Image (spheres, helix red, strand yellow):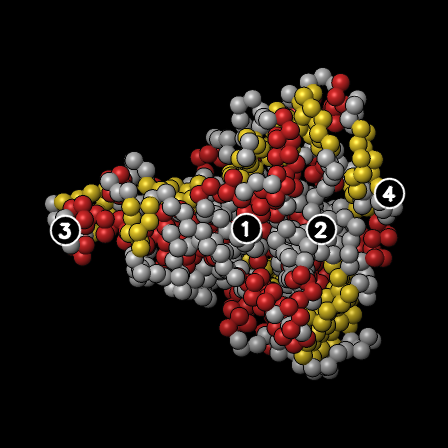
Amino acid sequence: MTEKGKKERKKVSRRKFLVRGGLGTVGVLAVGTYVFRNSIRRSLLSMAGSMELAYMGDTSDPIIWFEITEDNKVVLYSPKVEMGQGTFTGLAQIAADELNISFIQMQVVHAPTATGNIDGMSTGGSTSVSGLWQPLRELAATMREMIKLRAAELLEVDASTLTIQEGTVSAGDKSITYAEVAGRTTEWVIPETPDLKEVGQYQFVGKPLPRIDLADKVYGAPIFGMDAVMPDMLYAAVCRPERIGSKFVRADGSEAETMPGVVRVVIENDFAGVIARSMIESEDAKGKIKVNWEGSVDLQQEDLEEMMTVGNGKHTLIQKKGSALADDDGLTLEFRTPIGAHAQLEPNGVLAYVEGDKATVILSTQVIGITRKEVAKRLDLELEAVNVIPTYLGGGFGRRLHTPHAVQAAVMSRAVGKPIKYYFSRQEEFQHDMFRPPTHHIVRGKVSETGQLQGFEHHFVSGDVANNSALMPKVLPGIIGADIGAVRGGMIQYTEIPNYRAVYWHVDLPFATSWWRSLGLLANTFAIESTIDELALQAKRDVIEFRMENLGEDPMSMRLKSVINAVANKAGYTEEIKNGRAMGLASSIDAGTPCAQVAEVSIEDGEIKVHKVTVAMDPGIAVNPDQVRAQCEGCVIMGMSASMFEEMKVVDGSLQPIIYGPYRMALMKHAPKEIDVVLLQGIDKPGPVGEPPLGPIAAAIGNAVRRLTGKRLTRMPLNLSQA
């Protein structure tokens, strides 16, 4: 219950769910329609690139968040999904501290939509822990107070005389457990939120406690979407085109209907699918459906790169100060990054069962509320009649922000009256991903004769990232003038430069692109930090000093200075090449979290070898330091894979490759021997940690290679054929 939402005491049934909406960030941006222009627009975009999204769900009633079990444990129904980042453990630590229970008494599960606990902003943006920090503490403290007041009634004592420890409320020789209080209560009184504990009073927050989902994952418990089963379920497969731009027109399923195991062929106005008694039988029969596709695009990789070039599409000046540089004034570098696939281990899929006017949907998703709305709309059901049950995700990274397969499964289930399970094949997953868009960057910088940076410009082009996705209303791009996903990391963070500007160009692509972990951060930081490094080298300036003098004195810049100093000190940063190894440094700010990295690199057998990466990050309060360090390590490995190996291409109108192997990814042998992480606390609350450490790694590696070879790498995936 936030301060704004506090109410006088009220009585609620233990089964009464209160669901309230909020205007939130998107609403605030949308209210002004086309009033927001030019400088105001740029201000909004600047904020969007550095702020974290607020939690947009019900915080009025602890009862829809918490359940007390008979064995005196507390279950938290999380509106955020766990996709491997350790969110459930951090949330358990926060809640346990305010509930006055032991950590082992705390359990966390996904909240089905039937509970009413739904986050309107989904799971993403690295904000699960940071966004719930305040509301979850308030809810837990309020729940504790509810139990305390009821315990006082049951024990017939004054509430002020009570103490609480490990879920037991005591007064002298009288005591009662949380479970006993809950068992004797049918109507709760919700008081005003009590004062929260100081962070220094917490027993669990800030401690490296073991993950609460560890045992399930070690022993292979059926916790992922692919594990879901229902009695008498059938299996389905859906026809998908292989060529870019293809639109479904019509289908003939007569031959498929004769295939072994087939129960029914379902042909709608937008898809064709087949239902069978096994997954193999459904896949085999799918190949016999004759589908007419229209609108395919005859596109090659060179056509794509010509399309994705600065100067094409619509442009928006997203940041400026002073005057523009002339085209031939100073240093100019061009950078390109490729299409990136999510390539998560668990392909997308769903288990759906429609019974009359009710639907149950079980799947790995980051957009629980949106999935429910889409299913309800397609089936013409009341929203409350659709119960979406989220599971653990076998990899998310933004891929599971789109769930049209849930609608298709629900339609097929209604057609046969039985549960339907269906999953993408690996080929379909690669060809029908919501890709990271390719980018092109032109970066210019001018240094004075005395080595001061006089001007800096970043011009870059991208396809859709946030625009036109399930989360982003189509009206929003017209209001703010740019894709807030594509511009992440694209702003100039060196605000003491007298002249700078950033210009974003948007190009419509003929294939789907959207969120990919960190959005535009990796590509934009690669271009900007590589150019800053090159300017410092050509000016014969110390690269750290060069950065420092161009950073401001505002709080965020000071935090960035701190992480740069910390990473340099921890890594022992030097410009010298020692034992065939060189260091490269880069930094970035994402979602309000500054991060800097130093990569130690050599060249072995003509290949780039990363030996060590040192990370310094300021996430504010680290609720679970081990969890935050693990996020840094994961981002480094994923960023290395994306920047050194991964690449999708367009070949004869199709996206390739379609399987692991040809789609190269970092292997264990490519991982650095050591990833050293330093955590700073520049603010007194948790900040986002899941994506910010992905920003600097490509530039840090490229900067190290520049020292080894004298050549600047300007294209991902990074390799020495460019040098």
Of residues 536 and 166, which is closer to you in this image? 166
Asked whether disc 1 touches disc 3, contact meaning CB atoms under 8 Å apart, the reply is no
Q: Earlier in the sequence, mark 4 or mark 1?
A: 1
Q: Which mark is residue 652?
A: 4
Of the numbered discs in the image, which one, if any, rests on residue 157? 3
Which quadrant of the view contains residue 363? top right
Closer to the chain start, of discs 3 and 2, is: 3
Between disc 4 and disc 2, whose residue precedes?
2
Disc 2 crowd rating (10 Å Cα; few below 14, some 14-19, many 20+) is many
Gap between marks 4 and 3, in whole Å?
A: 79 Å
Question: With respect to residue 579, does 345 lie above or below?
Answer: above
- Residue type (three-letter) at the residue carrying disc 4: Asp
> What label does residue 513 carry, if any?
2
* Picture coordinates of residue 267, whole percent (x, y): 73, 32
Identified by mark 2, the residue type is Thr
Secondary structure, mark 3, is loop
Q: CA distance from mark 3 to mark 2?
A: 61 Å
Q: Nearer the viewer, residue 343 or 208?
A: 343
Distance CA(mark 4)–CA(mark 2):
19 Å
Which residue corresponds to the image point at 31% horizontal and 60% vertical from the top-left?
A: 8
User: Crowdedness of circle 4 by 10 Å Cα count: few (<14), some, many (20+)?
Assistant: some
Of the residues under marks 2 and 1, which one precedes in the sequence? 1
